[in-house]
Amino acid sequence: AEIEKDSDLMHIIHVTAEMAPIAKVGGLGDVVTGLARACLSRAHKVDIMLPFYECIEREQISELELITTYESYYDGNWVPTNAYRGVVSGIPVIFIQPSNYFFKGQYVYGGSYKELEAYLYFSRACLEWMQVTGTQPDIIHIHEWQTGSLPLLYWDMYHYLSLKKPRIVLTIHNMEHYGECRKEELSKCGLDGSIYATLDKAVDDRTIGHNPERLSLLKGGIVYSNVVITVSPTYLKETLCSGWLASALILNRDKYYGVLNGIDTAMWNPATDVFLPSKFNARNTEGKKICKYYVQRGLGLILKGTSASKLINEMENKVPLIVCISRLVAQKGLHLITHAIKQVEERGGQIIVLGKASDGRVQTEFEGLANLHNQGPSIRILLTYSEELSHMLYAAADMVLVPSIYEPCGLAQMIGMRYGAIPIVRKTGGLADTVFDMDDQLHRETANGFVFEGIDEGSLNWALDRAFSFYREKPEEWNTTIQKVMEIDNSWNNTAGKYIDIYNSVRVRC
Ligand code: ADP
């Protein structure tokens, strides 16, 4: 569909630690790229400011050029800094490269530098770049704790210098990481950290009693930004009810919004996806069967010598393939993922887990499971990060499993649906806003998956049972449901307008 251009145009600069596909760890990267692309399509001017991580593959950047050489303050020194401009996936990006050791290493996170320090430097370096180049966007859109010091630096420093026009929008993608920071650490970016060590600024009431030294960059961000957004309406309610910073959010309730993320339909499109052996769309899903066969064959999930036609015809609607693509962290419901592995096999299905663990113990546990099962006929546990494989798995899957304990928005269920995989999810956060149970008789129109509520194994079993019976006993209805979920519009075209409205509500016209 043709995207309508807006008439009242703005300049938006995202300041972020992640951007898909060049520096993506989880959903944050997808969201920044997708939202930026949607705003560009509506004719706004959009730039993304990103640390120039050493691990970024330069071949993925086009038109890369050095645009500014300047210095940015950190810990008593002015750090020589280079700003590069380039284009990634059609989106203009400004890369900030300090001359010190920050952002060096093999991965986006987990280098040998202190992340807190590097992001404090980065937040200031972005404002400093705007200052030295005279760039005054309407909106500086910051994300997560990493950029939480930026609004403090903006309102208490750069706004008194020459940056007058920008207003600050903060999106919280996950409340778990609140950017713990000591006063002295905050001072390293040039602010007086002790000024912010109060409840009305950057200290959370949960820590004030026993640890007034501990500031939260995310809280500072909440207090100092013009608008705070989180990534789904249900997660908004959850964050107001309990958890870190709930009281800060309640106090700032009138500038706090829940806007559901979209998916980047340019990047996630089964009709054009370069990673797929066979393309497909909602009206013709034959290619999806080929993708399933291709993945099963590639991973040794079928007996050698079975022909494609035999497999596709005889196994159709008998052996469902379930995929679970996830960072392997507690939030994602690890015990439910391991439980599902066994249950799916017992029920005669197949399951592929694609996940990366950052914690050594989790890694060891899943390695154990991989060693135990990966030679067998129905389970594959792939402990790696692979964008390419993720596309193939979504395309091959009959069902996509997202059993999160909490999930601010969740992209896997939305991407899965776009690729014709029926979601099985726990009812929490954005999962509750996007997946509606097939057996809910009152809401037949929206029904698009299988939903369970408890965090216990029995609740998951119940959802798996229902999904398996549906798949096997009502093949025609199943196929109609595939078509239905593929046609659901979870794109940014649908939701970017809400961001634009919010930007408009705070921008200054001068
Ligand atoms: P989170 O942001 O908490 O990681 P989301 O569901 O919002 O969760 O986004 C996860 C994104 O990361 C999805 O695009 C998913 O496909 C991708 N992803 C997660 N783990 C992997 C992996 N091991 N390999 C490839 N992609 C992955």
Image: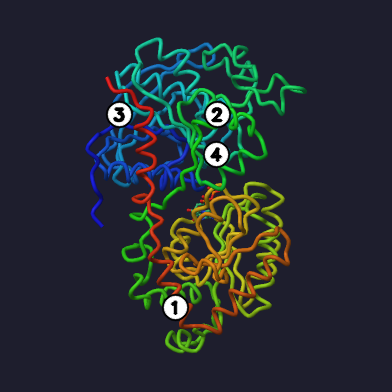
Q: How far separated are the C-alphas under marks 4 and 1? A: 41 Å
Give the foreground label among 3 and 1: 1
Q: Which residue is mark 2?
A: 252
- The reply to whether discs 4 and 1 touch (Cβ–Cβ < 8 Å) is no
Q: Amino acid at mark 2?
A: Asn
Mark 2–mark 4 CB contact (< 8 Å): no
Left or right, residue 16 beside residue 75: left
Residue neighbourhood size for the residue with mark 3, other residues' Cα within 10 Å, grouped as few (<14), some (14–19), many (≥20): few
- Secondary element under disc 2, as helix, strand or loop, is loop
x, y percent for residue 445 = 46, 67
Is label 1 within 8 A of ligand 1 (CB to nearest ligand atom)? no
Distance from the alpha carbon under mark 2 to that under mark 3: 40 Å
Q: Earlier in the sequence, mark 2 or mark 4?
A: 4
Split into 4 quadrants, where in the image is the C terminus?
Answer: top left
Q: Is residue 406 visible?
A: yes
| Point 61% across, 38% down: residue | 240
Q: Which residue is mark 1?
A: 479
Name the disc covering residue 66, or none. 3
Estimate how packed mark 2 is, as few (under 14), some (14 to 19) or many (20 or more) residues with alpha carbons within 10 Å: some
Check disc 1: other Cα within 10 Å, few if <14, some if 14-19, many if 20+: some
Secondary structure category for the residue under label 3: strand
Q: Amino acid at mark 3?
A: Leu
Whole-Å distance between the Cαs marked 2 and 1? Answer: 46 Å
Residue assigned mark 4? 109
Q: Closer to the observer: label 2 or label 4?
A: 2
Between the C-alphas of marks 2 and 4, the distance is: 30 Å
- Of label 4 and label 1, which has the lower sequence position? 4
* Relative depth, front residue between 257 and 382: 257
Direction front: furthest residue: 442
> In whole angstroms, how far apart are the C-alphas of marks 3 and 4?
24 Å
